Amino acid sequence: MKRETEFVTTMTLPVSLGAKPGQFVMIWLPGVEEIPMSVALDDGKKLQITFFAVGDTTKKMALLKKGDLVGVRGPFGTHYQWEKKEHLALVAGGYGAAPMYFAAKEASKDGCTLEVFIGARGKEHLLYEKEFAKLPKTTVHISTDDGSKGFKGFNVQLLSNLLKEKKHSKKKPWIDQIFSCGPERMLVSVSDLSFQQKIPSQLSLERYMKCGYGLCGNCVVDPLGIRMCTHGPVVDNVTCRKITEFGKCHRDALGRKHNF
Amino acid sequence: MDLSQILLGVHFSNPTVLASGIWGITAASWREVARNGAGAVTTKSLWLHEHKGHANPIIISTEHWTLNAVGLPDAGIEKAREEIGDYNHDKPIPLIASIVESTVDNFAKVAEEIVKLHPDFLEVNISCPNVEDELGRPFACSVVDAAAVTKAVKSVSGDIPVFIKLSPNVDNIGAIASSCADAGADGFTVINTVGPGMAIDLRSRMPILTNKVGGMSGPAIKPIAVKCIADVYKATEGKKPIIGTGGIMTGEDAIEFLLAGASLIGIGTGVAYRGEKIFKLVCDEMKKWCDAEGVKDLSELIGGMHRRVSGC
């Protein structure tokens, strides 16, 4: 167990599930609950989960000690996909930095050049900054809401600014793909930017999941009726823009709609 | 080979039906199931009022079986109105509304509300095995209780056919079916999940499901489903259509259900085992089998085992 920031903890499990970046697993605390969690790393030997201790179960998870028992099943869902040597922009908000780091690590093995945009409320909430910086051919762009480090404002704005600057670069397009993971409002901005700039993007969309493999139906989205545990969580922007509830509402454990 | 049929006045383009409790919690998801080739959809079981399900873990699967204790979560009648109302505007395939309640009177009340939404069939879920701690022994385990619910629902269902979803976890499913038929049931869904069963995690020595027990589904339960379908068909002299459900993975499984007496084929857990394309795959496999066997119409198959055994 490693405390990353005030509310964020990374848990390392001595197993590999062959998970790919963007996929999720179900983590079970016997006697408490089982919840879906994004994979922060699976290197063939160990599995890491980085989580925000905000609910009853995650708060209990944050208190676990080395040797405590947790159940894990998966991996489930879709994952980020790239071609060798692509130039990728990775936009990470909050603890979305964890799966983005996993994607960055794997993509850099394929010779990809990475522009990483880490955003957080303030510098004390920035995640994985040092880890990203250690990756080859990687530039880290920091933004904070309060301006305590890097650009004062949203990371998507920073990416947008950079795209404008590079408008006349020789390489067309300057960025081949955008990957993003984080709060849904941020994803909407990424989706809009990706659409306007005609740069393909892959976004991680979170919905309330129970089973994780397509049976319970709790994670269906309007109007496509597809299940985010099997068709997602990583969806391409073309699909994402057909999801009318994207950025607007989501369903709870009873299937009832709630606005964001 | 044309897999279509008309059953109790409703046209089905093929016999595959999305089983209740799987995937279909919204109008959008029912349409997506239709795009994947199903002949009809069944809603998740609808309650009069909000009903919370069980806490996670609610499900565990192996290659052979799945145990679930989702616990019938539902937001209540308002959401049903919204979703079924939406679906009715542009309805690609028939809708079977599954209803559940805790008392005979409430079954009539929820049925009365759902009937106003004009589903093609009502499916009365009196057989869920994973809510016994809360609701007691399922109504489907008693000839008296099962008939009482049937009668109550039939008193408000008007011209909408009522299918009673039966439990395999009984001594004599034929007797339960007969008593429901006498009370006015128009058809049966056979079967609900088996057991319930339990799975224990070795390291923590705890039951894996929060509810401890869960209904068993998946390929392993198919022979039980075949036997129950055959029993119900025989007990009702083949006069009540059956939606055969339980362990269907392939077109040949579906043919076996038809021979036992089913007219429609429910597919649930198979969605996880073969993906959403299972509806189309099962239909293609059925057609292939029928073409090879020279079968021209589903009616040649439905209940075929009984005719062969009795020699008529």
Image (cartoon, coloured by chain):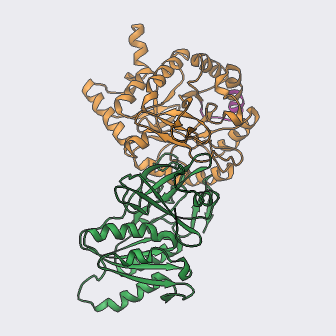
Chain colours: A green, B orange
Q: For the point 37% across and 79% down, which residue is it?
A: A133
Image spot of residue A247 (x, y percent) = 53, 70
Tell me if residue B173 can be seen: yes
Q: For the point 68% across and 49% down, which residue is it?
A: B76
> In the rendered image, which quarter contains the N terminus of chain B?
top left
Considering depth in this image, is B241 or B159 the residue closer to the camera?
B241
A25 in relation to B95, above or below = below
Q: Which quadrant of the view contains residue A199?
A: bottom left
Image spot of residue B240 (x, y percent) = 54, 23
B40 in relation to A229, above or below = above
Image spot of residue A61 (x, y percent) = 58, 57
Residue furthest to the right: B105
Q: For the point 36% across and 34% down, which residue is it?
A: B250
Q: Which quadrant of the view contains residue B46?
A: top right
Q: Which quadrant of the view contains residue B177?
A: top right
Q: Residues in magenta?
A: B150-164
Magenta span has B159? yes
